[in-house]
Image: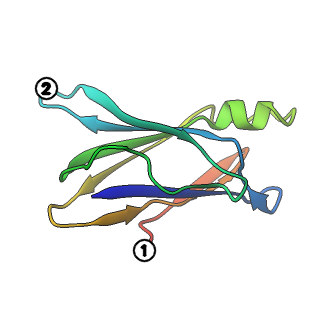
Amino acid sequence: MSISTHVLDTAHGRPAAGLAVSLSRRNPGESWSVVGRAVTDVEGRIKELSSVPLDGGEYRLDFATGAYFKASGIKAFYPEVSVVFVVAGGETHLHVPLLLSPFGYSTYKGA
């Protein structure tokens, strides 16, 4: 199974290029292990967040939103956005987009 994302900067009407993202998987006992890291491309996309196949389970995407906005001289209310989601067994690909502004965000399960 693979996981991708697409981040759009809705405050500026453009892709959020250069935004660091990490993907973690929940371990038994409630701790997390990072299974992938990447930076969004000029289109705000990361096509594959892990170089190894992923199984079903609970995952978390951490978006470094504070650093992204700081690079443009903007203070963000949310220095980091974390999105936790469950992957059912049998899925081959999951897309998790993020719509972002300095003072809010929205996410959904994409196709």
User: Which residue is at a point 29% across and 44% down the rendered structure image?
Assistant: 52
Residue at the (23%, 36%) spot, across then down: 26
Q: Position of residue 47 (x, y in %)?
A: 50, 57
Which amino acid, by three-letter code, is at mark 2? Gly
For disc 2, the neighbor class at 10 Å (few under 14, some 14 to 19, many from 20) is: few
Which residue is denoted by mark 1 in the rendering? 111
In the image, is 10 to the left or to the right of 23?
Answer: right
Kindly state the secondary structure of the residue where label 1 is placed: loop
Number of numbered discs visible in the structure rendering: 2
Q: Position of residue 40 (x, y in %)?
A: 62, 47
- Picture quadrant where residue 8 is located: bottom right
Residue 34 shown left or right of residue 41 in the figure = left
Q: Nearer the viewer, residue 33 or 51?
A: 51
Q: Amino acid at mark 1?
A: Ala
> Which of 5 and 99 lies nearest the eye of the viewer?
5
Query: Is 16 left or right of 109, judged from the image as shown?
Result: right
- Of labels 1 and 2, the one closer to you: 1
Q: Position of residue 109 (x, y in %)?
A: 41, 66
87 lies above or below 70: below
Q: Residue furthest front?
A: 51
- From this view, report whether residue 35 is shown above or below residue 13: above
- Considering every residue shown, the one lying at the far right of the view is 73
Find the distance from the CA under tag 1 to the CA under tag 2.
31 Å
Chosen colour scheme: rainbow
For the C terminus, give its image quadrant.
bottom left
Q: Which quadrant of the structure image shows residue 45?
A: bottom right
Question: Residue 29 bears which disc, if any?
Answer: 2
Which SS class for mark 2? loop
| The N terminus lies in quadrant | bottom left
User: Does label 1 or label 2 sit earlier along the sequence?
Assistant: 2
Q: Locate residue 68 relative to residue 85 in the image: left or right.
A: right
